[in-house]
Image: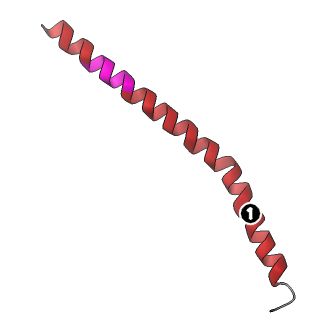
Amino acid sequence: MSPGTPDLILLILVFIGLQAWWIIPLIKNNNKLNDRSRELNEEIKQLEKLYKK
């Protein structure tokens, strides 16, 4: 094993950790917004059906 291999592995792990630190909350927030938009679309469809009658 080369002398710099553990440092390189550590650097890669830190980089992946930092990327996950800001990407994961964005994905969670996006999923919440998507769920809310689906609920609103269902409510809109129900109201449209109600007022068409």
- Residue 11's x, y, as percent? 79, 70
Residue 8 position, x and y percent, is 79, 77
The region drawn magenta spans 39-45
Please provide percent x and percent y for residue 44. Answer: 30, 18
Picture residue at 70% right of the left edge, 50% below the top: 21
According to the picture, the residue beneath numbered tag 1 turns out to be 15
Quadrant where the image shows the N terminus: bottom right
6 versus 11 height, above or below: below
Instruction: Indicate left or right for 2 with 17 as reference.
Output: right
- For numbered disc 1, what is the local secondary structure? helix
> Percent x, y for residue 37?
41, 28
**The stretch drawn in magenta includes residue 52:** no
**Residue at 82% across, 91% down:** 2
Task: Identify the residue shown where x is 69% and y is 56%.
Answer: 19
* Quarter assignment of residue 38: top left
Q: Which of 1 and 48 lies nearest the eye of the viewer?
A: 1
Farthest bottom residue in view: 1
